[in-house]
Structures are given as structure tokens and as C-alpha cells.
Amino acid sequence: MRAHMLAAVEAAPGLDALDAVRVDALGKQGRITQLLKTLGGMTPEQRLVEGPRIQGLREAVTTAIATRKAALEDAALNARLAAETLDMTLPVDATPAGTVHPVSQVMDELAEIFADLGFAVATGPEIETDWHNFSALNIPETHPARAMHDTFYLAGVEPGGDERTVKRVLRTHTSPVQIRTMTSQAPPIRIIAPGRTYRSDSDATHTPMFHQVEGLVIDRGITMGHLKWTLETFLKAFFERDDIVLRLRPSYFPFTEPSAEVDVGYTVVKGKRVIGGSGDDTDGGWMEVLGSGMVHPKVIAACGLDPAEWQGFAFGCGIDRLAMLKYGIDDLRAFFDGDIRWLKHYGFAS
Ligand code: PHE
């Protein structure tokens, strides 16, 4: 019986077969289990002989099963490893890959164009202090931009403390970067500051998060002429056309004086507005693209500079709008869908 059982263990071709052998020998109704039960009916002399013999058989079979089991598991693992080898030389599946988003693309283009004009790129936090976003920019308490329905205020502000650190908002424009730059570096200053901005606003032409680029020049003897030349040079480079016509309209911003809204002329080509040409041409029109002006002396003074010595200009421009105009994109909201087919359609993914 012993030799027979051990042979069956050795011969078990797989883990299932081995388990069947185990049940047959050691299970509740197993043959060894049955043998052990016969010990009870034996005389002490018989038991002295049969006891160790049956126990020995049980141990030998148990050990043999464990050894066989380990061997079978090893073999199964080796077989799996052999089957699962990775062939690094196989070509990968062609999954569609995303690429640069139009907004990022435009930010890169802006940085490049302004770098040629000697502008550095500056940044500031998206969670701003009320002081940088409003007060230092000469925006009075009563200004509509400060109302809850326009601005996302952050909760959890400690009372008292420094006006420049308490009371925080999601910046409503990139203009606080003007303040951060003027308070951290000495003029002459020439920077642009592209980034995310937030207003409590949402419809087909407004999203709560949008992008702006700020421009700031602070030096001696800066005039509106420098502003106009800079904007014209920038827009010609950006739209890659020489026939860009600008129109400066008097306007009001608390942080610039005088202030001007800048329109750019467009013409209509195949039913679409295309930037270029005078807006006064037949079929043409004017499109507002940015706000600008000479930096208000109060803003210069709030940053600790002497307005009698330092002047400058600033401008702020919506980047999403620029991207839509340059690439002929109709719906602002598509910017946030992350749809690769859309990127492809506008040539941003292959
Ligand atoms: N910050 C203004 C806005 O968001 C734009 C602006 C910037 C105007 C700089 C003048 C100077 O509308």
C-alpha cells in the first residue's frame, strides 16, 4: 500500500490530480484515515506494532504530497514565466497621443514674440491677496469687480494681521503680477505675465477660469507712443500679418491713466472674421482685444517707486480669445473638453 500510494503521488500530473490522491489517502474517508480508525479495536500488543507503522505511512505520504506539490507549483511558475516573456522588439500599438493645447501654444508664442522685444516672463500666484489684486492697483472698495458675484473670495481668513497677507482671492486678472514685479525688482522693468485668472462667470463666451497675459514696462520717459508701437509689433507678429490696424479708444481702468481699450480691425472671409485690414473697410469691423494704459502714479507709489522718476505702460489681454481668433475656434468651452478629435481638427494633434 505504501509503495502504491507514494507512486501515485509521484505520478500526479498536476495540482488537481495530486489533491485527488491526497483525499483518497488522507481525507475523511481516506484509506490511511480508515486504517488509523482500526487502531481503536486492537489489543495493546497489536497497537504497539501497527500504531507506528500506520503513523509512519501517514507521515511519509504527507511529506511526499508536500514535496510533489512544491515541484508542481515550481513547474507551473516556470511555464508561466516562459510563456510571458516580453518581446521588446515588437512595435507598440499606435494609441492617439495628445499634444500641446492651443492655449499653451499661444502662451509659448507670446513668450517668444516678447522675448524678441526684450521682455522677460514673470509669474505670480493664482491665489492672491486682496491687496495685490485690488488695493495696490488703486481699485476702490466700491469697485464692481470686488463684488462677490465677480470674485471668488477664499474663506478662513484670520482677522487682523498684515493687509498684504490676509484676505485672499482667486486673482481676477494678471495685473497683480505688475505689483509683485515692481515690489521685487528694480526698474527698468519689461515683463509679460501669462497665466490663469478667475471670475464668477460662465456662458458661451465666459468660463470661470480663463487666461490672460499682462504686459508691463517701467522706465524713464515712457510714453503712450511706446505702448502703441509695442502692441502693434506684437499683434503683427502674433497674427503673422503686416496689415494689422489698431484703434485705441479712451477707456477707464483704476490702475492706468490715461487708459485705452485696443481694437483690432478684421475683415470677413468666407463668413468668418479674420484679423487684418482696417475695420472701416466694407465688410470689416473692429474687435476689442485688450485693455491698456499708462501705469497710474498711485500704483507706482504703492510699490515704493517714485512716480516722478518712473513711468510706464501696462496692458492686459485675454489669451483664450487670442487663440480663438488666430486659429478660427468658435466655442470657448471646447478648450476644456480635452477631446483629442477637437485638437486634431484645429491641427494641434496628429
Ligand atoms: N486687468 C485688466 C482686465 O482684466 C486689463 C488691463 C491690464 C488694463 C493692464 C490696463 C492695463 O480687464
Image (tube, helix red, strand yellow):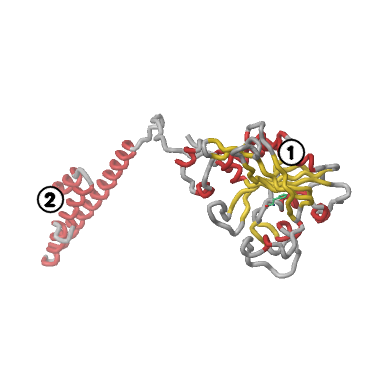
Return the x and y of residue 238 as percentages of the image width and height: 64, 36
Say which residue appears at 55% left-offset and 56% top-offset. 202
Relative to residue 14, is residue 116 depicted above or below? above
Q: Residue furthest right?
A: 308
Kind of residue at badge 2: Met
The kind of secondary structure element at disc 1 is helix
Q: Residues within 10 Å of mark 2 (few under 14, many from 20)?
A: few
**Do callouts 2 and 1 mark residues in contact (Cβ within 8 Å)?**
no
Kind of residue at badge 1: Thr
| Tag shown at residue 230 | 1
Q: Nearer the viewer, residue 49 or 337?
A: 337
Q: Residues within 10 Å of mark 1 (few under 14, many from 20)?
A: some
71 to the left or right of 308: left
Return the x and y of residue 55 as percentages of the image width and height: 20, 57
The kind of secondary structure element at disc 2 is loop
177 to the left or right of 202: right
Q: Nearer the viewer, residue 246 or 189?
A: 246
Q: Where, by quadrant of the figure, is residue 281 drawn?
A: top right
Say which residue appears at 29% left-offset and 46% top-offset. 70
Return the x and y of residue 311 as percentages of the image width and height: 83, 46
Relative to residue 51, is residue 222 depicted above or below? above
Q: Residue furthest front?
A: 282
| Tag shown at residue 1 | 2
Of circles 2 and 1, which is in front?
1
Say which residue appears at 45% left-offset and 41% top-offset. 341
Return the x and y of residue 57 as percentages of the image width and height: 19, 53
> Is the distance from the Cβ of mark 1 to the nearest ligand 1 atom less than 8 Å?
no
